[in-house]
Amino acid sequence: MNTPRDHGLRLMIILSALMSFSSIATDMYLPALPTLVHDLHTDMGRVALTISTFLTGFSLGQLLWGPISDRIGRRGPIAAGLLLFAVGSVGCAVAADINQLLFWRAVQALGACAGPVLARAMVRDLYAWERSAQILSLLILMMAVAPLAGPLLGGQILKFWSWRAIFGVLAACGVLALFALKLLPETLPPTRRNRAPLRHTLAEYLQLIRDPRLLTYALAGGFYYGGCYAFIAGTPFAYVDYYHVSPTVFGLLFSVNIVGLMAVNFLNTRLIARMGSERLFQLGAVMVAVAGVVLIFTAKTGFGDVAGLAVPVFFFMAPSGFIVANSVAGALSLFERQAGAASSLIGAVHYGSGVFTAAMLGWFADGTPWPMGLIVGLAGVGCLVVALLPRLSLVARPVRT
């Protein structure tokens, strides 16, 4: 097994950039969602579908890239995904109506998902379980620049230009990442590649999904991601339309959550050696469940106005540092030659739940923050229930590698 000194800062920066594509493709245009309603002559529900459509493509696309990379290596599929992302972003920038925008968001997502799923697999190629959890936390800490800056940059672009320029910037990001890929080494040597034909992929996924340990990690993360994307899809309307905050203030409110996420990811890298990856994962689940229950109350009653939403949302988003890195590392530690497929399956569950909750938000939107608060709260409780299954001895604890 390689040591951390074998891999430099350059590799960490590139991997964190690859993992950030889901964030930049969504967070940067969040301040423009209310504007899209007016410019494209549509309604809030249809505009919310631009998020769920992206998540659908992002979720399903991962199921393709992971098994391919297990067989031919990581770099080639990443390059193909970045090119597809850039083409989809240009399509979004020139879309004439909401239907065209939805189509190009799907294309954009199919390319964007290659980066995160294969970056996680590359970490598994290089590191064992708890060390990989530390590395994933560091990568999430570094990639947090994207969601931190995304809404702020999107708000400024919207102020001086238009929402179309936001997608133009995203296309440029894809092209730049494609050039940076030349500096990324291949982490999966031919001797460790999966020799099974690609047509066996379905059977491979059926084998993976039957593993109760992987399923526990994937479902707990899925509930958490479902809550996060309900917040992402619902908060522009809750803050901007319902509470009438400016796009700039909205960007600041959104960015505070990313600061909390960064802080907890930093704590995770320090506490893993002392407390263990599994305990921190379960602690994070407790935190999001409590924050979710509080948010249900404040969203229903209006208690605290904007702060009544912002405070519990902060404590829901911050424990990502305990939940995501530790659950992904725990699941991938179980599979060496199927790390790409396992990463794909986890990502599909995570983002697939986001598809469902973002769509639910569009279905049940009533012009108030209540549907968002209820969905986020129930997702937090679901995350806790699934995360505690190993402690209840219903699922065996993974063996460390």
Image (spheres, helix red, strand yellow):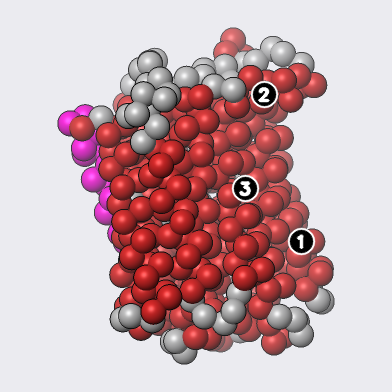
Residue 297 badge: none
Q: Position of residue 352 (x, y in %)?
A: 62, 47
Local crowd size for mark 1, using a 10 Å CA cut-off: few (<14), some (14–19), many (≥20): many
Q: Which residue is mark 3?
A: 352
Report the mark closest to the observer, 2 or 1: 2
Local crowd size for mark 2, using a 10 Å CA cut-off: few (<14), some (14–19), many (≥20): few
Q: Position of residue 85 (x, y in %)?
A: 69, 53
- Give 274 or 234, whichever is nearer the viewer: 234
> Vertical placement of 212 versus 75: above or below?
above
Q: Amino acid at mark 2?
A: Leu
Q: Position of residue 361 (x, y in %)?
A: 60, 67
Q: Amino acid at mark 1?
A: Trp
Instruction: Tell which circle, 2 or 1, labels the residue nearer the N-terminal end.
Output: 1
Q: Residue at x 60, y 26 (%)?
A: 209
Residue 97 location, quadrant: bottom right
Q: Residue at x 41, y 42 (%)?
A: 385
Instruction: Tell which circle, 1 or 3, labels the residue nearer the N-terminal end.
Output: 1
Residue at disc 2, secondary structure: helix
Local crowd size for mark 3, using a 10 Å CA cut-off: few (<14), some (14–19), many (≥20): many
First to last magenta residue range: 259-274
Q: Which residue is mark 2?
A: 206
Mark 1–mark 3 CB contact (< 8 Å): no
Residue 171 location, quadrant: bottom right
Q: Quick one: quadrant of the N terminus?
A: top left
Q: CA distance from mark 3 to mark 2?
A: 17 Å
Question: Which secondary structure class fits the magenta region best?
Answer: helix
Q: CA distance from mark 2 to mark 1?
A: 31 Å
Q: Quick one: quadrant of the C terminus?
A: top left
Residue at disc 1, secondary structure: helix
User: Within the magenta stretch, is there residue 267?
Assistant: yes
